Amino acid sequence: MAAFKAIGWVKGEDLRDLPEDERRKQLRQRLFVVLFSVIVAAAVVAGAWWYFVSSNYASTDNAYVNVSSAEVTPLTSGAALSVPVHDTQMVKRGDVLLVIDPQDAKLLLAQANAAYGMTIRKVRTYFAAVAVRQADYNRTKLDYDRRVNLVKSGAVSAEELTAVTNNFESAKAALDAALALTHGTSVMSHPEVLAARAALDTAKLNLDRTVIRAPVDGLVAQRQVQIGQRVQAGMPVMAIVPISQVYVDANYKEDQLGRVHPGQPVELTSDLYGSSVKFHGRVMGIGGGTGSAFAVIPAQNATGNWIKVVQRIPVRISLDPNELKEHPLRVGLSMSTSIDLSK
């Protein structure tokens, strides 16, 4: 109030009644008071805004769209017969991405099928042999028992008994060998049949694998195969980007994360659509370390001229799928994020 009295505002003093030098002095004083009042008011408003609003949000524009893309790799080798998709094409799960020439796989399937049939027939002979060996065993055992009973009466010579005994022992050994091949199994559960069946199933699977289908819904990216090119099992040929499942990795400064925890709501904007389009999401989790800690060559700060650098830690943010459907995002796009710390 004293300052206002000093420059004549309280009494309503008219500057036009003052001399020129005094009038200019009073005018400057009034302007300084107005400027000081505006600065103080702005500082009070800014402080109140920060205390009641800004301090409850953690924001950064160091954020990018990311996704766990599906890499398409053949599980069998062969020449590319057809590649019906191209980069940027939208595909559904189950759509054909690549067809490998199936002729080699068909031949191997035919061989495996023939081997399977032959194995079944072979195993059936094992079971038939058991019946034959059992009949031989019963016949030689009967002869052996008869000769043993006649030995005491002298009707059978020692030489004849030895021959009968040898025949009986041979028949018993042959029966044991036949039983060993079939014990505890049937024709279809026999190990040789199961092995042949597994080889047949493998051949069928390899034939099915000549047609490669999309594992998820998404966009085709990084197509690296052309018709006629020979592809090898395990060689990446393209990637499928599920844009409906994208998320945001926001790199926050370490001094911003004290109150951040999973589940907090996040408001996001994209440089692609501008500030008029708002995305909403939630904090999924906070990274296990800074980017420099997981670098190929980690930073070594044990030096004499060390300078502290504020580190950043990635915060993963999920996005509303309905908003993504209305405004699709692409991997790598820049985002601005604001986490509501009051929740």
Image (cartoon, helix red, strand yellow):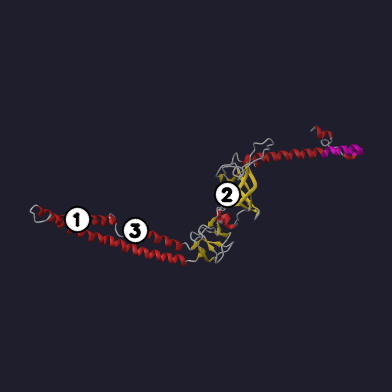
- Residue closer to the observer: 175 or 221: 175
Residue 39 image label: none
Query: If you read the primary sequence from the N terminus, does the residue marked by circle 1 or circle 3 appear first?
Result: 1
Query: If you read the primary sequence from the N terminus, does the residue marked by circle 2 or circle 1 appear first?
Result: 1
Residue 27 is covered by the magenta coloring: yes
Query: Dividing the image into 4 quarters, which one contains the C terminus?
Result: top right
- Residue closer to the observer: 14 or 270: 270
Helix or strand or loop: what does disc 2 sit on?
A: strand
Distance from Cα at disc 2 to Cα at disc 3: 57 Å
Q: Which residues are magenta?
A: 17-31
Helix or strand or loop: what does disc 1 sit on?
A: helix
Contact, mark 2 vs mark 3 (Cβ under 8 Å): no
Circle 1 residue: 166
191 up-or-down from 16: above or below = below
Rendering coords of residue 266 (x, y %): 59, 47
Circle 3 residue: 192
Q: What main secondary structure does the magenta stretch of the protein show?
A: helix
Circle 2 residue: 281
Residue 41 is covered by the magenta coloring: no
Residue type at the position of mark 3: Glu
